Amino acid sequence: MAAFKNIKSLGVLKNKRVLVRADLNVPMKLDDEGHRIVTDDTRILSVTPTITTLAEQGARVIVVSHFGRPKGERNLDMSLEPLGQPLANATRLPVSYIDDCIGEEVIETIDAMEDGSVLLLENVRFYAQEEANDLEFAKLLAANADFFVSDAFSCTHRAHASTVGVAKILPSAAGIALEKELVALENALGNPKRPVAALVGGAKVSSKLEVLTHLVEKVDHLIIGGGMANTFLAAQNIDVGASLCEHDLADTAKAILKNASENNCKIHLPTDVVVAKEFKANADNRTISINDVDSDEMILDVGPSSANNVAASLAKCKTLIWNGPMGAFEIEPFDNATVIIAKAAGALTKAGSLISVAGGGDTVAALNHAGVAAQFTHISTAGGAFLEWMEGKKLPGVEVLLSK
Ligand code: AMP
């Protein structure tokens, strides 16, 4: 990966106006009085080191973010105003809020800011020009600041005015969280220690086709679990009964398997599975060979023998990239294989023999469920951007930060 600029490259920041692109699109709910409150502050905590570092250096920090999909219209249900207090709590800095993100009043407010303080701008997607990456709108955003710092990895797959447009106008750099993320991803797939294993699970092949296609050319082991394994098994004429399966993708699955063997990528598919007739917690179930699935049974988890084989393979690997659960991990006991493998990967990482990188919403939930998220080398909370990175795509919000 070419070098990208970080905060240090911006030089002296005292008295400078720095526009920080955060991802404050955090989960919220209404409290008893009808106020919107934050239910998961992971993304607020993620941007906090960048904000406090800039403020400590005497910068005026202006935070810009989107929230939800207001489709270019002012919709107060998606206002960022309720994020001001949580941001102040996390950064322990004075945070003020203004109900717009561009224009004279915003600029006057910024001019009146104390050095080392923070201003939170209103939802940038209240303007349709944001998602259109409109140049004139990007210029108006850029007029708020001397420098731009991007610290929202989860938004880097979108070429919008606040992720790409403004970075083309102002001297720009990656924030602390983005820098950490990019280094971790580079170590996992760009220039990894081998052997490298990728574990791809989740519901459907169709949603991760490009991921699988790219990975077989990059990794030494591809471990396929979850509902998507069924499609690969069925393509090899194994009867998967009533399981979730995309039979129409049989040829695609065969092509991926062929490509894997041409690229010396070993594919791991389950040889034993846990089946049930109902998709519900503690449904009657049995653990059987993959060849013994009855027509009314669904495969809801990889079997323990296969899960232990995966764990043994990981012990011989130096790097692991993980996206997607091995089974229907939200309902017990079909979380078993995910937990076995997650614990094995966590222990190997803790022992220093494995670099483990995981990402995507369900994957983070699964690793938290197994209680091993903290043991992983790096966990990305980005959904779409993480998958696009796994697909080998260039992320426009990262490309724009690369040193020319
Ligand atoms: P994804 O968003 O593609 O990573 O898929 C995650 C979802 O896949 C989770 O909600 C799991 O419950 C589901 N899943 C994993 N394995 C299976 C399976 N064997 N059958 C049905 N759903 C599954």
Image (cartoon, rainbow, N blue to C red):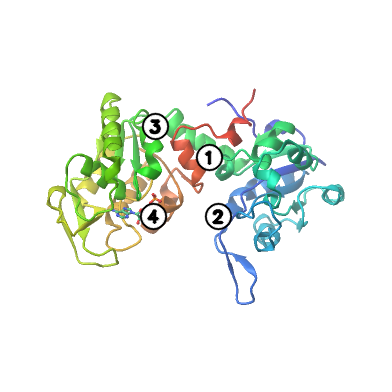
Question: Which of 45 and 120 lies nearest the eye of the viewer?
Answer: 120
State the residue position of label 1: 181
Q: In the rendered image, which quarter is residue 251 located in?
A: top left
Question: Which of 173 and 400 lies nearest the eye of the viewer?
Answer: 400
* Label 3 or label 1, whichever comes before in sequence order: 1
Q: In the rendered image, which quarter is residue 142 located in?
A: top right
* Label 1 or label 4, whichever comes before in sequence order: 1
Q: How far separated are the C-alphas under marks 3 and 2? A: 29 Å
State the residue position of label 2: 42
Element class at badge 4: helix
Q: Residue at x 25, y 27 (%)?
A: 261
State the residue position of label 4: 366
Q: How far separated are the C-alphas under marks 2 and 1? A: 14 Å
Amino acid carrying mark 4 in the image: Ala
Q: Give how far across and how far down residue 230 sits, in percent.
A: 25, 47
Q: Give how far across and how far down residue 314 sits, in percent.
A: 29, 39
